Structure formats: C-alpha cells, structure tokens
Image: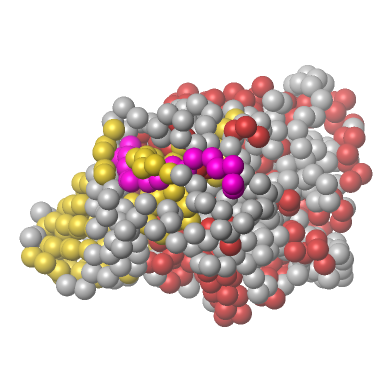
Amino acid sequence: MNVKGKYSRRKFVSTAMSASAISVLPGAQKLLSGFTGALGGREQNPVSLTTTPAWPDQGILNLAMSPYAKLRNVPVHAVTIEAGFWSPRRETNVTASIPSMGKLLEVNGRMDNFRRLTGKSTAPQRGPVYSDSDIYKWIEAAGFALQSDERPELRAVVDKDIRDIVAAQQADGYLNTYYVLEHAAQRMEPKTQQHGHELYNIGHLLQGAIAYYRATGDRTLLDAGLRFVNEFLWPNFGPGADKKPLFSGHPEMELALIELYRLTGDKRHLELAGYLLTGDSRIQFKPENYVYHFCGIPFTSRTHLEGHAVRAMYACCGATDYYLETGDQTYWKTLNTLWKDLVSAQMYVTGGVGARSDGEAFGDPYELPNARAYGESCAAIGNMMWNWRMLAATREAKYTDVIERALYNGINSGMSLNGTLYCYRNPLAFDPSSGDKIRNEWYDTTCCPPNLERTLASLPGYLYSTSNEGLYVHLYDNSSLDWHLENGTGLKIRQRTNYPWDGNAEVAVAPAEPAEFTLFLRIPGWTDTAKVAVNGKAAAGATAGQYLAIRRRWSNGDTATLQFDMAPQVLEANAEVVENNGRVAVQRGPLVYCMEQIDQGEGVALKDVALSAGKDSSSGFEETFEKDLLGGVLVLRHPGTVYEESADRSSLYFSHNAPPRKSRPVRLTFIPYYAWANRAQTPMQVWTPMARA
C-alpha cells in the first residue's frame, strides 16, 4: 500500500445511530456545523437481505445463487479445526493477535479518527489516508472469529467501535475520516480517487460488515455501508452524463460490491462493480498510472500481471466474482491469461507475489529476486483469495494447489509464532546486517496484520465446498464438518491426520442417512504418488494435481484413507530466473523449507554453503520432528559443503583457472520457511547453491 514517491499507495432488522442520538454527544453541534452535510444516520426502512441461505449459514463467499459457480462455500461455523497444525495458529490469532492489534489500532489513533468527528475525542487525524481500512479489516477478522466461537468480550469491543464508526457518517451517506473537515474540499475529486483510497476504505467496510453480520446478525455497520453505496455513491457517481466518474484507485470495492449484491440482490451493486472494472474514460491519467493502479481501463484489456501486486490480485478477485455472476467470457479469457502469467513467470515458490519494493509491484517475467523480494503479506493473501474464486468457477485442483502453497508458506510466514509480530514483506533471503528488522509489532501502513488475522480466522471456510454432485475436500487438517449436501441431507465429516508432517489422512463419512453422492478428495500436485482406499479397499485413479471422485452410496462409518508421498523434494527454477541458476529449493509436502544460519555449525555462514546431492536429489535427507523447536516442526538435515575463503578468488574478478576454494563437508539444517525469523536475528535463505561435482 505504498504511497511514497511517485505513487500513493436470514433477514435481521436494526438501524444505524440516528441523528437525534448523535446530537446529544459532547461537541456534536460544533462539529455538525463544520461538515458539508449533517452528521449521523437517519431512521430508514432497512434494505432487504437474502435468506438463501440464512445469514449464519453464508460462507466466506455466498455463491448459493451465483449462476456460474460450480462450487458453493461451506460456512465457517460448520467446520471445527481441532488439535493439529492450524489450531495453535488460530488460537493464538484469536487470543493474542486480534486483541493486541485492536489495542494498537486504538493507541495509534485509528478509532479516534472517528470519534473526533462526533466530539468524543480532541485528537487530530492520525495515519495515512487508508487508515479507516485498518479498522474495517480488524472488524472482519473479529467477525470471522465470532463465526467460529462466541467471544462476548471481543464482541463488546467491536460493537462499541461500530457505534463510533456509524456515528461519524454524514447525512448524505459519505463515510471517511480523512476527507472531512480540513480535507473536505478534496472529497471524491479525481486526484483523490487516484490516491485517496476512498473506495478502498468503503470496500473493506463492506467486507468487515458482511463478515460481522454473518457472525452476529447485527447489520448496523452493514446498513452504514449500504447508505454509502445506495444514497451517496450510486445517485452521484457512475456512468451517465448526469453523474460524476469514478476511478477505483486501489481495487477492493469491486469484489466488495459483488458480495454485497449476493446479499441484497440489488443489481445496481453488480453493475457498479462492472463499471469500475471497465473504467471511465472521463478520468484520464498517465499510462503508468493504469499499470500501477491496475484499474481505470477495461480489465478485459489486460494481458499480463503488472503494477502494484495487491491491487492486481484484488482486481482479479473482483473480476472473477463478476464472471461468477455474469458468465462474461471476455472476463474468463482474461482471467485465464493472467493466471497462466502468474504461475509460469510471476509467483514465488512460497506462493508470494510482488518482486519489487518500488511500487510494491510485479517485475518483468521471471524477475523473482530473493533478498530483494517484496512478497507483501497482503499480496499472498490476495493470491489465495483469487484462486479460491477460480476454484469455485472450475472445480480444478490446480487452483487449490496455489491456495495451499500460499497459505502454508507466503501467508503463514507473515505472522510470528507468538502472534504479535508481522512481516510486511516476505523475502526468500535475508541478512540482518542490513539493519532491516523484518518482523514488527506495528506499521503505520498496517494493512498486513489485520489481513493476516482475517485469513486465519476465516480458515475453516476454505477446507470444504459443496456441489450438486457432493462434497469437495480441499485441505487436510484435523477437523470436523457438520453441514449438509445441497439436497439437504445432513452430513458429518471427520478428518484425522498429522498433515503436513506426514502424508496420511483418514476421512470418516457420516451422512444423516445412507445417501449416494460423490466425495471429491484432492490429490496435491506436489506428491509423486498417492494411495486412496475406501473401507480398506483400494480406489483407483488417484492422480497428482486432481480431485479423485468417489461416487457411491455412503453410510455412517464409511472411511476413506489417503497416503501421499512426503519424501523431500529438491526443486530447480526455470533458467529464466537468473538469480536461481545453480541453486535449489527444498520442499516437503506443502511446506517450503529454508536455512537459518543459527541452525548451522559454528562458523558456518550461509553465503559459503552448498547442498550436496547425488542423482536422486531426494535421497540423503534426515527427518526429525523437534517438538520443542518453533512450536514443533519437522527439521530436515542433508549433507552439504562449506567453502573456505580463497585469496585467489577474493577479487571482484579473477581467472577461471584460479585454484578452487577449499571445502569441507557439513550437515545442513532446514526448517519450514513459515517459521523463520522467530528467534535471533540471523541470515536466512530458501535457494541454496548446489555443490560442484
């Protein structure tokens, strides 16, 4: 979200706080007179919301009525993640991360920005123009957490914040804490739309409000968002000579509007999203602006990923949502073109995206530097969000493979194991001697921390999907599903596994009554072999990178077992990724591994080591599960070489015939990439040179 230099970076009735209620707040009359319109909501008939399904049973995306969605989401509350890989992360998220971030947002003035507008605070406005979104993403994280469990203390805090937020809404529906009072003249001006994040902020408000509504049935914040869209935005902005043009600036509003459409059935919300995805020629910017912002020109004219990585990922999310509702084939063609560009030339082995710090941007094809990798946490999350939508459109496991790669690696690395420190960027090599502190408690641009929190809180909603044929199992972890098939038949699923530390999983199936349906089991693309059995009888057709469809009459007590090959793999990069020529990365199952210098022998520097591998690159690995290390991780060790300094080779340039450096054998230690930078400051690398034969 960089703004440095050239670029800025079931029906439920309730109503928002009324103007009469606001008028009794201290200092309210003085502030009211300073606004372009009177503050506060007014009594109104609430917008009707869908009851298909009822509000508690809507998933991360409500695709129940989306005509081009082949998969439907399972609600977060229907899945319980039990003791295993993800449960400690999620528990830390809800007991440490979300509460501590709420306090930091408070301390750093994010809520005072709202309260000052109603006389409840005398603090000045603090933070960048997009600071409102920090609060909205945090509310979304809380909303997803409340979908899993009742947490009265958390809900009380959020309810209080929501009251303060809606109290700051102007009479015309506008809601933004920056472009008011002293900045009111800049509100919704073309230049402000470019860099001011007004639509970005309200997009996150809508997403946070929807998640909170689906958790609690409370639509107070949602009604404020609807007022912004229906009473302020739609009557005054959009296509037509009688309206002012819009420029998205930072894509986000597009996908939020479409989820709002799924909730309201109001086609104006879908149409407005389509308008933003097309752009409006009445607002003209330089060509480089359309690259950086990844909006303003027709999405369907895009041929490759470029510009700000988070903006591009969110734009792709919105465009996929638009396709899921309209079936527009020009969008689908573009989405496939961009996805191919992503996985063939632009994505890190960790699932991260965004090569350049300058503009937080995609680089040229195959430009994937390691130490200079930006890999913003928000961009990896955007990658996961986009592939979740592509999966819904196709039912193809290649999208789930990307989801898993990003989730276990480039996203999971973004939050410390104690849940209170965050990586904004996620490089694939790091040297602390640069003075850079990679994990921090707070960033003034604090988009990543609450984004990570909402992802972990929503995780149960990503494990399964339904179709008219049956149930899809996407991700493997100890968990219980209590839901139903699309024909209404009750269904419980229980997974038992030590994934990702081993490749065995048991999926116990318990329909409410015997029923014929298909169970789709994902076979990860990374496994060399996979074995599947049902009630002990082998099932044929398990193929890496595909879903295995098992159609039968399922009864309570039926069990499917899976076994994936978890042998460590040594990966090479395409030769076009010049920085990684002669280097390899280590992956085991879905986890990418790295080396931290602290784990190597005394006096061994990462810059001097190489991996020694024979013809079978996966041989030679020693696996040890160390329960007291980094929350419990499987450590890999492999023979390697450490080179000594050589005077003949110390110059910037030297003869090819210079004597080779002396070397000695060493045992190299690898840990999962997600766990790096959780101990002392120490060098780290993912890609390691191969020893010369």
Query: In x, y percent, where is residue 512?
Result: 17, 55
Residue 183 % position (x, y): 88, 39
Question: What count of labels does the image hold?
Answer: 0
| Residue 647 rendering spot, x and y as whole percentages | 59, 42
Q: Is residue 21 above or below residue 285?
A: above
Quadrant position of residue 159:
top right
Which residue is painted at 46% across and 44% down in the image? 662
- Quarter assignment of residue 382: bottom right
Residue placed most toward the observer, 161 or 583? 583
Question: Which residue occupies 28% across, 64% down?
Answer: 528
- The image shows residue 364, relative to residue 260, as above or below, that is below
Is residue 513 rendered magenta in the image? no
Q: Is 114 situated left or right of 340 in this image?
A: right
- Between 148 and 666, which is closer to the camera in this rendering? 666
634 drawn magenta: yes
Against 673, is 243 above or below? below
Report the quarter where the C terminus lies: bottom left
Image coloring type? secondary structure
Residue lying at 40% horizontally and 45% vertically, measured from the top left: 641
Q: Is residue 229 left or right of residue 377?
A: right
Q: Residue at x 48, y 56 (%)?
A: 583
* Left or right of 14, for residue 239: right
Q: Tell whether 560 sits left or right of 341.
A: left
* Residue 371 visible in this rendered orientation of the protein: yes
Q: Is residue 674 visible?
A: no
The kind of secondary structure the magenta stretch mainly shows is strand
**The magenta stretch spans which residues?**
633-649
State the residue in front, 312 or 257.
Answer: 312
In the depicted structure, whether residue 171 falls above or below residue 468: above
Furthest residue toward left? 536
Q: Which percent across, then down, holds residue 158? A: 56, 30
Question: Residue 538 is drawn in which quadrant?
Answer: bottom left
